[in-house]
Image (cartoon, rainbow, N blue to C red):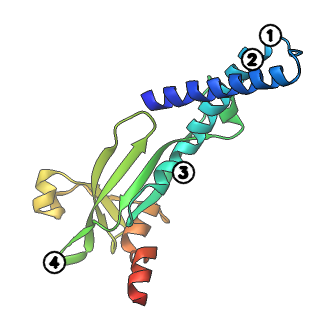
Amino acid sequence: MFLELIATFTAALGAAGLVLLINKLTGGRLPKWVMPVAAGLTMIAYAVWSEYSWADRTEAELPPGMVVVKRIEQQVFWKPWTYIKPQVAALAVLDHAGMKTRPENTDIKLADLYVFARWRRTAVVPQFLDCARGMRADVSDAALADPAQAQWRPVAAGDKVLGMACAPLPPTPQSDQADDG
């Protein structure tokens, strides 16, 4: 958050410097209010860009095998532009590469679901996913020892978490290159 504040101020200083340069080149013809207005508008524009682009930037930094299963959008009244285009407030990410199965039942998978949210710590939610029955359950200590002890609940048809967990992991660009050699 501190780096975002520094970047916002740096953008404002850059805008003020550009207005100063334009003012010098025009012989001081610009009104005095142009510089603070340009700096303020630049700060607002940078803050809006940063809020809208954090999810894409976070997704681009995910390691191979991490799959975004849901983008949680929000509209808030103190950001009226979110009513035109909702802002992504959180990402739900499935660790497909790190999933585990039980030898006695390969239809049940143990997966970590990560929830990345703007300005919050990342939450890790371990999940049992039953591909054969189309159900999922939160992991508890008792359920970890015996998945039958979990409180299973059906998921809606087309649930992306279950669909991605039960699908084979798509090849990554690195693994494609390794196969070529």
> Looking at the picture, does residue 62 appear above or below residue 30?
below
Can you tell which of label 3 and label 1 is closer to the viewer? 1
Viewer-closest of 44 and 147: 44
- Amino acid type, callout 3: Asp
Question: Which quarter of the rendered picture does the C terminus lie within?
Answer: bottom left
Q: Are marks 2 and 3 in contact (CB under 8 Å)?
A: no
> In this figure, which residue is indicated by the disc labeled 1?
32
Q: Of label 4 and label 1, which has the lower sequence position?
A: 1
In front of the other: label 4 or label 1?
A: 1
Disc 1 + disc 2, Cβ < 8 Å: yes
Q: Quadrant of residue 85?
A: top right
Real-space Cα distance between discs 1 and 2? Answer: 7 Å
151 w.r.t. 12: above or below: below
Task: Tell me the amino acid under the disc marked 2.
Answer: Met
Q: Which residue is mark 4?
A: 103
Quarter of the image for residue 176 reads bottom left
- Residue at 20% over, 76% down: 105
Q: Residue shown at 63%/40% (left/top)?
A: 86
Residue located beneath label 2 in the image: 35
Q: Nearer the viewer, residue 111 or 58?
A: 58
Query: Image point 70% across, 22% down: which residue?
Result: 16
Picture residue at 12% right of the left edge, 52% below the top:
141
Please state the horizontal and vertical placement of residue 94, each as a whole percent of the image: 37, 59
Q: Nearer the viewer, mark 2 or mark 4?
A: 2
Specify few, some or many for label 2: CA neighbours under 10 Å numbering under 14, 14-19, or 20 or more. Answer: many
Which type of secondary structure does the marked residue at label 1 adopt?
loop
